[in-house]
Amino acid sequence: MLILEFDNSELDVFNEVMDVVKKHPDFKKYELQMESALRLPGLEIYPDRRKIYRDRREISLTAKEFDILCFLAANRGRVMTYGQIYQQVWGDYVQDIENNTIGYHICHLKEKLFVASPCSPFNIRCVRNVGYCFELIPEEEPF
């Protein structure tokens, strides 16, 4: 929901405009749709724009890197198998999945995320012979 505020000088003009709109019911109603974003500590992912920001700085990713990160981040805390990742990103199912293909893209993705912020509060963890898991790193509590 979008809330607009007007000061008193603008209120009269707004009321006049609304009176005109009410007299013509054939006006189309337009609503602003708020863009959804996946927000994690220090990371914002905008799927509709295919953009990722780390501390308000855009991170340039390839299409496959973007799709992999979105899929893993949306399923954070869960181990996603090579098959699940391949099917989600490449869109087809292959009996003998080439794990090196996924590993190649994740390696480059992790490098780019590290360059953007070496001390990230998240990690993409490899689960050997199974897949990958996007994890948030808990903050250490002060004594």
Image (cartoon, rainbow, N blue to C red):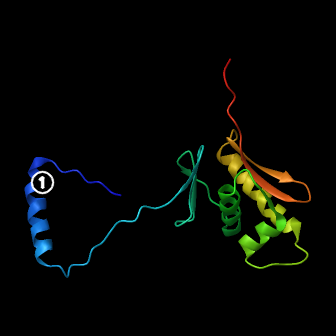
Residue lying at 62% horizontally and 59% vertically, measured from the top left: 60
**Residue 107 at x, y percent in the picture:** 80, 56
Rendered-image quadrant of the N terminus:
bottom left
Identify residue type, mark 1: Glu
**Residue 102 at x, y percent in the picture:** 81, 65
Residue lying at 70% horizontally and 36% vertically, measured from the top left: 138
Judging by the rendered image, the residue that carries numbered circle 1 is 10
Task: State which quadrant residue 74 falls in.
Answer: bottom right
Task: State which quadrant residue 10 falls in.
Answer: bottom left
Residue lying at 26% horizontally and 54% vertically, measured from the top left: 4
**Residue 91 at x, y percent in the picture:** 73, 77
Q: Residue furthest bottom?
A: 26
Q: Is residue 113 left or right of residue 57?
A: right
Mark 1 surroundings: few (<14), some (14-19) or many (≥20) residues within 10 A = few
Q: Is residue 26 left or right of residue 98?
A: left
The image shows residue 135, relative to residue 91, as above or below, that is above
